[in-house]
Amino acid sequence: MSMESLQDLFVDQLKDIYNAENQLVKALPKMAKSATSPELKTAFENHLEETRGHVERLEEIFEKLGEKPGGKTCKAMKGLVEEGSEMMDEDAEAPIMDAGLITAAQRVEHYEIAAYGCVRNFARLLNHNEMAHILQQTLDEEGAADKKLTKLAENINTEAVQPTGA
């Protein structure tokens, strides 16, 4: 793809995020299965549903742009998902596993917050106001997911500090 305008970069970055979200649709069920905290498991399951909605919103934006969503692999998300998979492969005590899963999930959320913030700004500059609104909605949800993980980490990380059997 030729990168000659902000519009080209906008479409390119949307394709990157689209691929990232689809990678998460596959990863989140595995994270939910590995979580031992019922609250964390539920948070992952709820975020899976939200993520599916993010994919649908992106598809709506691509349709408005007259573009196809595929054709790009988000290497950053691929690496973040691989790190999360490594954590799930560890032989860890329950609260340690959950703390590691939260760490992996928050890295993902922070990546998504950065990515959605950038494309939302591009949309505003390009006068794609409706798309900017849609992207802001997703950005708000990603921020809320990060805050939820932070709240869950307060208890889970405290449990992880306790020696086994204490």
Image (cartoon, rainbow, N blue to C red):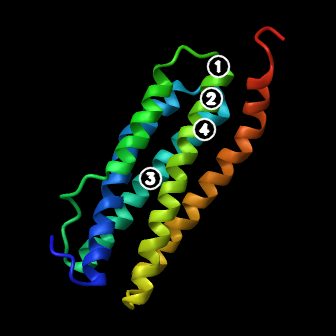
Three-letter residue code for mark 3? Thr
Residue 79 position, x and y percent, is 38, 42
Residue displayed at 67% across by 49% down: 148
Q: Nearer the viewer, mark 3 or mark 4?
A: 4
Three-letter residue code for mark 4? Ile
For marks 2 and 3, the one nearer the N-term is: 3
Outermost residue on the top side: it is 165
Q: Nearer the viewer, mark 2 or mark 3?
A: 2
Residue assigned mark 2: 98
Q: How many other residues sit within 10 Å of disc 3, few (<14), some (14-19) or many (≥20)?
A: many
Residue assigned mark 3: 51
**C-alpha distance separating marks 1 and 4:** 12 Å
Residue assigned mark 4: 102
Residue displayed at 45% across by 72% down: 118
**C-alpha distance separating marks 2 and 4:** 6 Å
**C-alpha distance separating marks 3 and 4:** 17 Å
- Location of residue 14 with respect to 105 vertically, above or below: below
Q: Dots 2 and 4: beta carbons under 8 Å?
A: yes
- Location of residue 79 with respect to 61 vertically, above or below: above
Q: Is residue 50 visible?
A: yes
For marks 1 and 4, the one nearer the N-term is: 1
Residue 40 position, x and y percent, is 63, 35
- In this view of the protein, which residue sits in the foreground, 119 or 140? 119
Residue 109 position, x and y percent, is 53, 52
Three-letter residue code for mark 2? Asp
Three-letter residue code for mark 1? Ala
Residue displayed at 51% across by 32% down: 32
Outermost residue on the right side: it is 166
Q: Quadrant of the C terminus?
A: top right
Q: Dots 3 and 4: beta carbons under 8 Å?
A: no
